[in-house]
Image: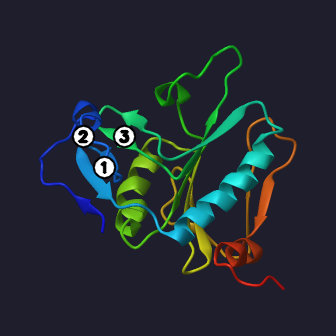
Amino acid sequence: MGMAATRERWTAEMLRALPDDGRRYEIVHGELLVTPSPSFTHQRAVRELNLLLGTYLSRVERAELMHAPADVELDADSIVQPDLFVFPRIPGRKVHSFADAGTLLLAIEVLSPSTARYDRIVKRGLYLEQNVGEYWIVDCDARCIERWRPGDERPEILIERIDWQAPGAPSPLVIDLAPFFAKVLDEAVE
């Protein structure tokens, strides 16, 4: 189960000093978030989204897709590990670390029982205040994706399809959600 640690305020340096013990450690505004390894369904959803976004972005030179584990430092006391994230590629600028990635165009978290509070409240607040272009919360149990954009008071709840367009792409990526969730949940697709 995910839990917040008891220290008052964590820093990036303190986070990097933690042992590699198979857990995911993140900090948001100095609060340490600790979560266990993800479930099989969670990983299937991440794999399928990685495949769909990766194929789409392979034709776009101005954006790049990455996945966790990856420490994305959004400010001095906030390091997160989105399940998937897309950042802009700027011509002439090489990216050698996650710190070089800059503002995120898209951050995606797939819900797990132990991470729902963090993903829906703590991380959402951080992503919105950092002006992440879009934040998707993928809920496999409810078979929906919550889409958040900067300035949103409420999410857009998508149950049929979601579309997203990378900078410089001639058309958007469109994901039909019924077949996506059927594949993730290992159900027969009709």
Indicate the quadrant containing the N terminus: top left, top right, bottom left or bottom right: bottom left
Q: Which amino acid does the dot numbered 3 rest on?
A: Ile
Q: Position of residue 174 (x, y in %)?
A: 79, 60
Residue hosting label 1: 21
Secondary structure under tag 1 reads loop
Q: Which amino acid does the dot numbered 2 rest on?
A: Leu
Tags 1 and 2 in contact by the CB under 8 Å rule?
yes
Residue hosting label 3: 79
Q: In the image shown, does 94 or 21 lie closer to the viewer?
A: 21
Q: Position of residue 144 (x, y in %)?
A: 61, 74
- Residue at image position (75%, 55%) is 52
Looking at the image, residue 136 lies above or below residue 66: below
Q: Nearer the viewer, mark 3 or mark 1?
A: 1
Instruction: Specify the quadrant of the image occupied by residue 18.
Output: top left
Q: Position of residue 93 (x, y in %)?
A: 63, 16
Q: CA distance from mark 2 to mark 3?
A: 13 Å
Q: Quick one: which residue is furthest to the front in this view? A: 21
Residue hosting label 2: 18
The earlier-in-sequence mark between 2 and 3 is 2
Indicate the quadrant containing the C terminus: top left, top right, bottom left or bottom right: bottom right
Q: Nearer the viewer, mark 2 or mark 3?
A: 2
Looking at the image, residue 184 lies above or below residue 22: below
Q: Quick one: which residue is furthest to the top in this view? A: 92
